[in-house]
Image: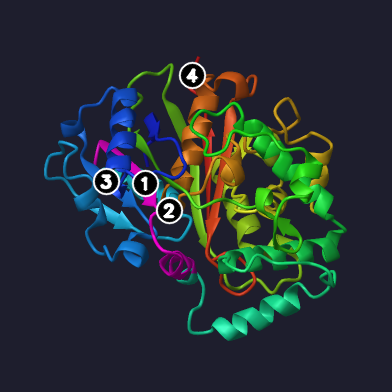
Amino acid sequence: MTHSFINGVGMTRFGRHPDETVSSLALSACRDALIDAQVDPREIDAVVFGNATWGAMGGQHGIRGQLALQNLGLRPVPIINVENACCSATTALQVATAYVKGGLAETVLAVGSEVMSQAGLPELLAAFEGSWDVAGREQSIERLADWGSKTPVPPDAVELASRTVFMDIYAAFARDHMARFGSTPEQFAAVSSKNHMHSVHNPRAQFQKPFTVNEVLEGRAVVWPLTVPMCSPVSDGAAAAVVSAKAVDKSRAVRILAQRIGHGGSWDGVDPRGHVSHQTGLLSFADAGVDPGDIDVAEVHDATAVGEVQQVEHMGLVPYGEGGLAAVRGETALGGRIPVNPSGGLESRGHPIGATGLAQVFELVNQLRGEAGARQVDGARLALAENSGGLVGVEEAAVAVTILEAPAR
């Protein structure tokens, strides 16, 4: 096994791009990553392309990466297509690293690209439906209803008529967390407010508007206890990374210490330490030879605010039951003990599904280089990305954890 380094990263602004395509966004992110890595396209030995919705929304299956990157100027190298729900881009990065560590390639390009805003509502909802058990839909709905029933929904609660199934999933997660640990909507709102505050300093974020806790609570209801500011938007965008066995520029090359992907579905819902996220995190920390307390900055999967609450607990960054309280106390904000989602997270930076994992990596690479500007975490040396998606049983279907180390200085 050899070391692997991220020598370059690129990312478009996330948002609604009516004049862009999966290809145009991917090409933009890839070109920026190649320039950042000081690598010519013809030096790339393989490409791994992540995308989750082009098939469901546009009918494009099978050769997505080959079509998206045909004008990048590559040699006739392998292009591997990966689809793994919201983990698609991180999966692309892990496959790229495996190529390098396995000695099959010297330099590999990982890219995730998604256009979600141009589809009609039926196509959009269908894309999300594909990330849980379609055949067992009714049983899943019943299980989630039971899962969240320990915290009754207020009789005057209203719901957004058109929403993805994953908002109902996260609402059930939220109500379970409230019953299990005593968390509150105000704590979820504190997470959301923090992330929206962070995104003010991120020029690539979909939203750059601050929200107070009260403004989050007073936002339009999605499904109780979630409001619109607590939830990730429909987004377009792309992100990319160049992975190599060698550091091109030792002052800027970020080392990959650990990468793990775990699949969910076996958790019985009792002890949270049995959750796929916690188990995958434990393996990742063991691989890296570090502990949660060593992490200086993290990006976690906050498709809703409760997602961040759950994942910072599963990763061991805060004790179980204190994910929301940590945001209330300012521990997970910039300047706090363990800044989480300095990019603004999925809630505010945006969530083009097939690009999100590499957007997390883009943020953390810049943090570890000391190039994050107004959202820079002072002295960041170790960073963690947690990216998850889909649903099997009462846990995420896929969870990816990446631990990165700052360049040698």
Lower position in the chain sequence, tag 2 or tag 3: 3
| Residue 295 placement (x, y as % from top left) | 65, 34
Q: Which residue corresponds to mark 2? A: 117
- State the residue lying farthest toward the left: 76
Going by the image, does 250 lie left or right of 230? left
Question: Mark 1 — residue?
Answer: 18
Q: Are marks 1 and 2 in contact (CB under 8 Å)?
A: yes
Residue tagged 3: 23
Number of other residues with Cα within 10 Å of mark 4, as a class: few under 14, some 14 to 19, many 20 or more: few
**Which secondary structure, mark 2?**
loop
Q: Earlier in the sequence, mark 4 or mark 1?
A: 1
Measured in 3D between alpha carbons, the distance from the residue under mark 4 to the one under mark 3, in whole angstroms, is 35 Å
Residue with the mark numbered 4: 408
Tell me the crowding category of disc 3: few under 14, some 14 to 19, or many 20 or more residues within 10 angstroms, Cα based: many
Find the distance from the CA under tag 2 to the CA under tag 3.
15 Å
Specify start and end residues of the magenta stretch as a single range. 105-128
Instruction: Kindly check if marks 4 and 1 are in contact, taking CB atoms under 8 A apart as contact.
Output: no
In magenta stretch: residue 108: yes
Query: How is colour applied across the structure in the image?
Result: rainbow
Question: Could you tell me how far apart the alpha carbons at marks 1 and 3 are, in whole angstroms?
Answer: 13 Å
When the figure is inspected, residue 241 is found, relative to residue 180, above or below; the finding is above
In front of the other: label 1 or label 3? 1
